[in-house]
Structures are given as C-alpha cells and as structure tokens.
C-alpha cells in the first residue's frame, strides 16, 4: 500500500493545483520539478514529443494556425480572457508589423477590456504613418517562460519590430525555483542580524539568471534582423504602501519591543518631520527587511521638497518585496541592471525615468498608476508615446518627440476611464491602501461613469447585506453588468474585512457627483455591523481589522501585530440602560522576556488588563456605557511585544524549508479562540423589526 503523503508535500501539491488553475505555468513548472525531482525526461520521450509538435498546427498563445490565419483555439477557452479578444489575425501582413508582447501592465490591467496599450500605440502610429500595424500579444499574468516562448515563435509572424513590456511577474517563479541548498541557506539566516542582505543575495541570484535568459532571447531576435525594444516597467513609488502593515514584523528576533515603541512614538509626534526622519532611520536599522522605515523616510523627504531623495527611499521600500513570499508585482533593480548591462542589441526605454518628468510632485504616484505597477490612462499614453517615438525612428526613419505624440494619443471614453478607476478603488481597498487613494479613484469614477455610480450603490448594499453575497439580489444585478462582471468576484464576504474605507469613499464620491446616497447607506450599515441580536460573534470577518486575506491560526484568529482591533456599530434600537459585556478567550504566542499583560481598550480607553500567558485565558469585561459611541466602536487588544523569536536550524529538506519560511515570515503575537459581545437589557424587551429572507436578499 502506498504511503500517505507528508503534510508539507500535501500543502505544496495544493499550491501546485492552485497555480495550474490560475494558469501560472512558469511557477507551476518550477514547483513540479521540486516536488518530483526523481521523474526523468528520457531523450527518446523528448524527441517523440518534438515530432508530435512538428506535425501539430502552429500555436501561439490562444491562437492556432488555420491556413494563412491564426484563429482562437476553443481548446484554450479558459485563457481567452487573459489575451486580447481578437478572434483571428493573418499569419503575415502587408504592413510593417510590430509585435507587442508583455504581461498585465502591457494589457492595461483594469482597462484591458477596451483601452489597451497596444490600441493606444496603434492610434499614435496611425497619426504619423499609415503602413504600421501593432499586433497585441500581451497576456495577463504572463510569466518568464511564456514570454520567452512568444519570442522564440515570433519569427513565424514575420515581424518588422518587437516590443517587450514585462519584468514585474518574476518573483514567484524565482521563489519557487530556489534550490534546496538556497532554501536552507535562507532558513539558516533567519536568526542572524544580517538576514535581510543574505536572503536578498540568494533571491537576486535567481532574478538575475531570469533576466539573463530574457536578454539572451531578445538578443537572438534582434541579431536575426528584427529590432527589439524593451520597456523597463515603472512602479507607484509615492502612493503605494507596502502590503505589510507597520505593526507586522518579518522574521523578527529580539526587536519587537523596540519597534513597537518607535511606532507608538511616531503616533504621538503627529509625524513631525525632524523626529519622524530620526524614527525612520531607527526603524530601518532595526528591520531593514520591512518597507515602512523606507516609506517613512521617503515621506519626510517629500515634505522637505527633495523629490530625488524621496525616490531613493521609496525605491528601497520596493526592493524589500524581494524577501517576502507574498508581494505585489514589481520589477527589481537587479533585473534592470542585468538588462541594461547585457542587452547590447536591444533598445531600452526606461519608463521610471520618463514618468518622473510627467509626475505632479516629481515622484510617480496615483495620477500615473492605478495600483502598484499598472498604469492609469495618462500613464499608458505617456508610455506608448515613448514607444511610438522609438518605433518610428527604428522602422520608419522618422524623428519626433514624446510630447507631440502624447498630444495625438487616443483617449479613453469617459465610461471606460470611470469604470477602470472604480475597479482601482476596489483593488486598493482590498490591498489596505490609504483612504485618500481609495477616494481619489472613487471620485474620478463617479464623475465620469453612470454605470460606475450604479455599481457603487449595488456594491455598498451587497457588501453590507448580512448574508453571503451570492444570495443577494445585488450580486445578481451586478453580475449582469458586463464591464464589471469579472471583478465582483474580488469581493468575498467570508474572506474580506468590512470595507469601511471603500464604503465611505463611494458614498462621498456619489455625494460629490450629486447622487446623495446617505439614507440607503445607513440602512446597509444597519444590516451589517449593528448588534441585531443579544449575542454577536466578533470573529466574523466583517468585524475585525486585518489584511484582505487575513492570516488565520489553526483555530481562531492569529494576531500578527501588536494590536488587534474589532469593530461594532451601536444600533438605533440600543437603549441607555443596555449593558454590554465582552467575553474573549485568548493566549500569547510565547512567554515574554519580562512580565507582561493583555490590555483591552474600548475606543482607545483602557477597560481591562490581565497577565499574559501562553495558556488559554477567558476574560469577561463589562463595557463602560459612557465610552460607547453612537457610531462605530473599536475594541482593541494589545499584545505583549517584549518577545524573543528564534527559528529552526535543524531543517534538512527543501520542501520543508519552503513551507517553514511561508508559515513563519510574519511574527505572531497571540491567538484569539473566540471573542463575543453580549447585550443585557434591564427593561422589558421590545420586539424589534425582524428582516424576512426576501428583505435580507434585497
């Protein structure tokens, strides 16, 4: 009888299945090779496969050759949404053909259904020369292996030039392809003070190899007589905050107490520039692996008017993503350095340098990006103007300037731009970005798009209806709006926090657009956070303040910062004589270095404390009626932070090491098994209106 798989292998197999489902084939291939290193690839099998391929029709992306046409292959229909929606295109063209190859940034993510960068490039070129054709081969989620494959097959399309816009998606593949030796080297570095630099060096080696592989393939295409232009992607330096909160520490050892003291001090000085700069310096010294210290230093430089210095700090914050096993897409300096140094036969367009000149503050921000790396319509127009200038010079012998080309670049319709910004607002909210950024995108959306305004109303109601979204009539209505249909699935009632920032940003945007939605929003609130019963479970994901995909303990809620916050809304039925009691069962993750306590606060005021231990402790705390506010109320639990973390050094297996790194990379301060709020009435209970199933669903 076959042995049951080990838990680590089962988890990795589950991850492999998820990668295949999301068509992340590059990372999936690397992980497969790690899982099954003993499976050989016999030469005769490879030769047989090559023979089969030779007899098969030519396939490029989701298109397959049929005569002199490339036609969408129905066998690949699950990937249709990831590519341009053209049904077919000719294998060759009587015009000068430019192949436009890239990942989601080249697809115009969030605008990709109607306003794609290749469309903008074609519009600019049409105004300058009529014999140029742009073939859009950009794909959402394109990995390095797929990118190289497209370049290898590109000669079959007889291009006159190739444009590559990629480099943001390589980190997951780099992590997945780390060797057992490299993984163990990272694990063994966790207890060392220089762990950041040691981890970064290992990952940089992988990313550099990947960049070299791309350079090699681009050089082959270029030396075969087809000019290649590479666009170095940009990043939202100013307005994208690292997905790791300031209170979350990455593989800490003894620095938790000192870090949290500095964070509390920062809150008390109200970001006074000189003191804030000093705190930033200390934070970087304590945890150079954490982005917040660099972001704070960049913000201080911005307030001083030193944009160049701010870019340097924000750039270092971006680089810390290399050492995290969950990080938004981005390019890294080692990739840029390798391509600049080694791509001798490739023309390079540095989008970061170009965007600095067009940014409002001297540091690229939300006016040019809709999230971490994807461009706004303005950013798309700037980037494609720079590409058009290079293409016109290379294959048409025409000289022009970016400003002139930008002026002639096609604009999105108001509806296209508005809906894209609405999707950006939702994405930014779910990545825990600032209320300012969320509001910025909501206001543009509400101003430009009628369908965006209707979507906001529906989204508000769907979000705050106290039943799973799939059961609400609003979900069904939103699912019928073709523009938004692929994106409403971003919102999962069971996994997301209550979108309070997004809710109010939408409400204010509707208000500014002249569509007052206050009354209906309050009704939605009353169906969500209010205490509708005399007992309520605050472990429901809509009540706690965490990341969009909250880290969960084996059982209960995992505290991954020094403070855990839960919200409730005092409803209109609450009487002055009502009494609330909080009941919480919790434990600390590990024994503190010195005596420590759990501290419970209501709206910032301490209401209880108890010695912190690693054994389960149940506390019953009456809430002071005088501290309860008529709107949102915050119950916070402060955890002991004077902890000393150590990491295993006895691992000898690569898969076990990879699993351990993923599990331990954010410090856990404690676990909450349950947290409930009880209401006791001291008066005859008045029957409250009960919502019927039909009312709940509407």
Image (cartoon, grey):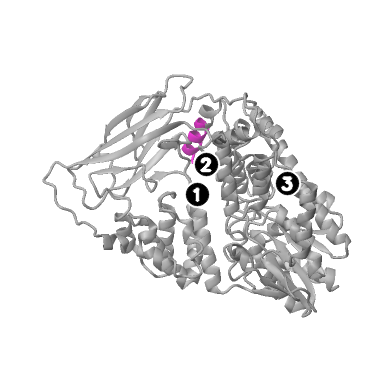
Q: Are marks 3 and 2 in contact (CB under 8 Å)?
A: no
Q: CA distance from mark 1 to mark 2?
A: 9 Å
Neighbour tally class for label 1: few under 14, some 14-19, many 20 plus, Cα within 10 Å: many
Q: Which quarter of the picture shows residue 6?
A: top right
Q: CA distance from mark 3 to mark 1?
A: 25 Å
The residue under label 3 is 333
The residue under label 2 is 245
Q: Residue drawn at (41%, 57%), measured in percent from left and top?
A: 503
Provide residue 502's location: percent of width, then percent of height.
44, 56
Q: Which residues are magenta?
A: 260-270
Provide residue 540's location: percent of width, then percent of height.
36, 45
Q: Is residue 649 above or below residue 288?
A: above
Residues 153 and 165: in front is: 153
For residue 449, which numbered disc appears in the image? Answer: none
The residue under label 1 is 432
Quadrant where the N terminus sits is: top right
540 is within the stretch colored magenta: no
């Amino acid at each position: 009888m076959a042995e049951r798989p080990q838990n680590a292998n089962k988890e990795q197999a589950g991850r492999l299945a998820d990668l295949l489902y999301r068509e992340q084939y590059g990372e999936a291939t690397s992980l497969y090779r790690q899982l099954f290193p003993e499976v050989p690839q016999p030469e005769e099998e490879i030769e047989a496969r090559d023979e089969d391929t030779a007899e098969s029709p030519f396939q490029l992306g989701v298109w397959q050759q049929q005569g002199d046409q490339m036609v969408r292959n129905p066998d690949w229909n699950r990937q249709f949404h990831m590519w341009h929606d053209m049904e077919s295109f000719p294998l060759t063209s009587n015009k000068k053909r430019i192949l436009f190859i890239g990942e989601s940034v080249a697809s115009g993510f969030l605008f990709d259904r109607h306003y794609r960068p290749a469309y903008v490039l074609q519009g600019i070129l049409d105004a300058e020369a009529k014999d140029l054709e742009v073939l859009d081969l950009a794909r959402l989620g394109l990995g390095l292996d797929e990118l190289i494959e497209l370049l290898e097959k590109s000669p079959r399309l007889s291009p006159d030039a190739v444009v590559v816009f990629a480099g943001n998606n390589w980190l997951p593949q780099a992590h997945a392809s780390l060797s057992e030796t490299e993984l163990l080297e990272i694990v063994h570095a966790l207890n060392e003070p220089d762990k950041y630099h040691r981890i970064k060096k290992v990952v940089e080696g992988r990313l550099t190899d990947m960049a070299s592989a791309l350079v090699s393939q681009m050089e082959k295409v270029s030396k075969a007589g087809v000019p290649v232009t590479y666009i170095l992607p940009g990043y939202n330096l100013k307005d994208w905050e690292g997905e790791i909160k300031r209170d979350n520490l990455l593989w800490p050892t003894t620095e938790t107490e000192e870090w949290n003291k500095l964070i509390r001090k920062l809150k008390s000085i109200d970001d006074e520039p000189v003191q804030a700069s000093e705190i930033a310096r200390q934070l970087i010294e304590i945890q150079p692996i954490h982005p917040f210290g660099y972001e704070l230093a960049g913000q201080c430089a911005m307030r001083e008017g030193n944009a160049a210095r701010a870019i340097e700090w924000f750039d270092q914050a971006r680089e810390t993503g290399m050492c995290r096993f969950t990080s938004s897409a981005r390019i890294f300096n080692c990739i840029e350095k390798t391509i600049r140094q080694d791509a001798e036969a490739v023309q390079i367009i540095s989008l970061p340098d170009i965007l600095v000149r067009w940014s409002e503050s001297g540091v690229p921000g939300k006016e040019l990006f809709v999230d971490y790396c994807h461009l706004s319509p303005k950013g798309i127009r700037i980037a494609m103007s720079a590409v058009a200038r290079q293409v016109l010079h290379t294959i048409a012998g025409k000289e022009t300037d970016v400003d002139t080309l930008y002026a002639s670049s096609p604009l999105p319709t108001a509806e296209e731009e508005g809906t894209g910004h609405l999707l950006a607002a939702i994405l930014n909210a779910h990545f825990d970005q600032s209320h300012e950024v969320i509001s910025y995108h909501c206001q543009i959306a509400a101003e430009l798009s009628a369908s965006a305004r209707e979507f906001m109303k529906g989204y508000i109601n769907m979000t705050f209806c106290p039943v799973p979204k799939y059961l609400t009539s609003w979900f069904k209505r939103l699912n019928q709006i073709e523009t938004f249909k692929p994106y409403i699935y971003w919102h999962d009632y069971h996994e997301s926090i209550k979108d309070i920032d997004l809710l109010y940003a939408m409400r204010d945007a509707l208000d500014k657009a002249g569509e007052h939605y206050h009354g209906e929003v309050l009704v939605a609130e009353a169906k969500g956070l209010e205490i509708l019963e005399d007992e309520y479970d605050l472990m429901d994901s809509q009540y706690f303040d965490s990341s969009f995909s909250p880290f969960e303990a084996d059982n209960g809620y995992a505290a991954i910062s020094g403070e855990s916050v839960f919200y409730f809304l005092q409803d209109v039925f609450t009487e002055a004589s009502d009494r609330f009691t909080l009941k919480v069962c919790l434990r600390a993750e590990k024994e503190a270095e010195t005596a420590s306590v759990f501290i419970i606060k209501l709206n910032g005021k301490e209401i209880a404390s108890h010695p912190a231990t690693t054994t389960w402790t149940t506390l019953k705390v009456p809430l002071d009626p005088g501290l309860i506010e008529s709107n949102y109320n915050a119950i916070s639990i402060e955890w002991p932070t004077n902890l000393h973390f150590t990491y295993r050094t006895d691992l000898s297996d690569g898969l076990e090491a990879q699993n351990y790194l993923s599990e331990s990379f954010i410090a856990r301060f404690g676990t909450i098994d349950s947290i409930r709020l009880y209401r006791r009435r001291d008066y005859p209970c008045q029957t409250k209106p009960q919502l019927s199933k039909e009312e709940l669903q509407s």
